[in-house]
Amino acid sequence: MSRSRQSVVLWGYGGHGRVVAEIVEAGGGEVVGIVDADREKLSGQFELEYLESDFVTRMRTDGHGVLRHAGLLVAFGDRARRLERVVEFEPHLADAVVHPSALVAPSARLAAGVTVHQLALVNTGASLEAGVIVNSCAVVEHDCVVEAAAHIAPGAILAGGVRVGRGAWVGAGATVVGACSVGAGAVVGAGAVVVRDVDPGSVVAGVPARATGSGERATS
């Protein structure tokens, strides 16, 4: 984890991307570029601006040259695509960014590309892998492991020792009780209470949470 000044290129500049931009700046960093599929967002505001299709092609041939000493943060919501991009471009990810109002324990481990939002808590011994999002007011308790590109949505709570798989989504206000696991690509619905392990790729909702479908068809 780094709170030092760094230059960042944001991949995605919708609502979530704009939130991440403010977190970068609040932590003393600078957003120097954006990448987006919507050409209208490339308004000349930033030093580096790339249309997404062009950016992917150029990154695959000269990633460091394209970024020009900046780090990359993947800041769009599509879960499967975000995981794909985080994995492919992990060597180019920026240091983790943490909003000043968030609390991160000294023993917590934050990989590159992580964003920890306003008023979130990441407690003792927790481990966040590349590209994880811990959104506003979320709680990641002691010894949790959150795998690459998973999203812990606003107000969600992971109790001690929870494991969340790659690309999974824990919805707003949901709770996962201690030592349960949420499988890769799974979706936990908003407000759900998970009291047993969630299978990879499944969707669960309710109190207690029960399977309702496949995460492949769920939207983020």
Image: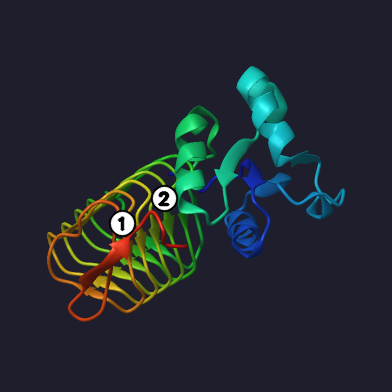
Left-right relation of 192 to 63: left
**Residue 199 place in picture, x, y as percent:** 20, 55
Residue at (70%, 22%) from the top-left corner? 65
Q: In the rendered view, tell whether residue 41 sits above or below residue 68.
A: below
| Nearest to the observer: residue 211 or residue 13 | 211
Residue 141: name its quadrant. Answer: bottom left
**Residue 68 place in picture, x, y as percent:** 71, 28
Coloring basis for residues = rainbow
User: Where, quadrant-wise, is the N terminus in this rendering?
Assistant: top left
Which residue is labeled 1 in the image?
186
**Residue 9 place in picture, x, y as percent:** 66, 42
Q: In the rendered view, tell whether residue 162 sits above or below residue 166.
A: below
Q: Nearer the viewer, mark 2 or mark 1?
A: 1
Label 1 Cα crowd, 10 Å radius (few <14 / some 14-19 / many 20+): many
Which residue is labeled 2 in the image?
132
Q: Earlier in the sequence, mark 2 or mark 1?
A: 2
| Nearest to the observer: residue 202 or residue 151 | 202
Q: In the rendered view, tell whether residue 96 sits above or below residue 217.
A: above
User: Residue type at mark 1?
Assistant: Ala
**Residue 41 place in picture, x, y as percent:** 79, 54
Residue 17: name its quadrant. Answer: bottom right
Left-right relation of 81 to 180: right
Question: Which residue occupies the extreme right position in the image?
Answer: 44
Disc number placed over residue 217 in the picture, else none: none
